[in-house]
Amino acid sequence: MGVVLGIDDTAAVALATRHDLTLVLRCRPGDHVLDGDPVVDIHGGAETSDVVATVRELVDLGDDRTPRQDILFAVEQLTEIAVRALSTGTNDPYTARNAFDDLSSELARLASRPTPPAVRTFDGRPRLVTTHVRVIECVDNVLDAVRLYAMSSPLVVRAGIRAAERIGTATTSPDVASRVSMHLARLAETCERDMTDPSGRADCIAAAAEADERIRHRTHAVGGYS
């Protein structure tokens, strides 16, 4: 029982190739598993006790999540810093803004990279099937937090909009760009409804529209969604 800290993909592919197997991971770093939970399905080849024992060694378990392979945990930690800074007892919008700015730079870098393949092959045969954290999951985590907790601070909302634009213009995925545009529309609607500062409300709504326009222009330029 414990948290999945990491999975040795390279060793898994080597093991599957050596024994003519296909390994299908049922978990990913950050998942909590109980004793007896299936973590890897073994297909093909001979499922000997030695193979099963070696497969178990591929999955590293621990007591607490770490950011070593768990990207979503790192995102959640920084988002939590921002949310706590926005609490009425703390009221530190500058810390929240800085946290969202830090998140935006890292997520823009992540969004610019190709999505890792879900299936690893060797000699034309599928050897390892994995589930990776999707950029969209990280985007939802960050931009939902802005919408739910930052309406009292136009400064922080603008940081969230800035994060959305950075991610949306950096990504090569039309799905990610479309998701970011959806979040910008939701942010604008929530600002219109819930932000009490008239000047800040108008600035944030305008900033969200401008960011969405730049994302759409960038996406159209590389042949993305309409």
Image (cartoon, grey):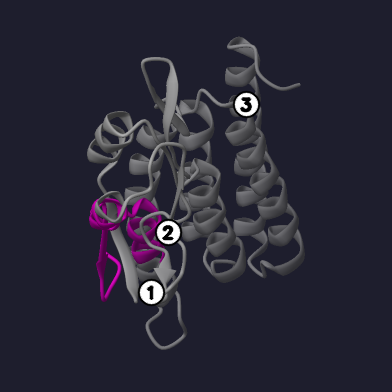
Residue at image point 75% right, 55% down: 189
* Residue 223 showing in the rendered view: yes
Q: Give the CA separation, mark 2 to mark 3.
A: 32 Å
Answer above or below: position of 103 versus 60. Answer: above
Q: Which residue is mark 2?
A: 39
In the picture, the disc for residue 85 is 1
Residue 67 inside the magenta-drawn segment? yes
**Label 1: which secondary element:** helix
Which circle, 1 or 2, is nearer the viewer?
2
Q: Which residues are magenta?
A: 52-79
Residue 42 x, y percent position in the rendering: 44, 46
Residue 143 x, y percent position in the rendering: 55, 54
Residue 159 x, y percent position in the rendering: 46, 51
Residue at image point 54% right, 64% down: 145
Disc 2 crowd rating (10 Å Cα; few below 14, some 14-19, many 20+) is some
Which circle, 3 or 1, is nearer the viewer?
3
Residue 118 x, y percent position in the rendering: 48, 34
Q: Give the CA separation, mark 1 to mark 2.
A: 37 Å
Q: Are marks 2 and 3 in contact (CB under 8 Å)?
A: no
Residue 184 inside the magenta-drawn segment? no
Q: Amino acid at mark 3?
A: Pro
Residue at image point 28% right, 73% down: 64
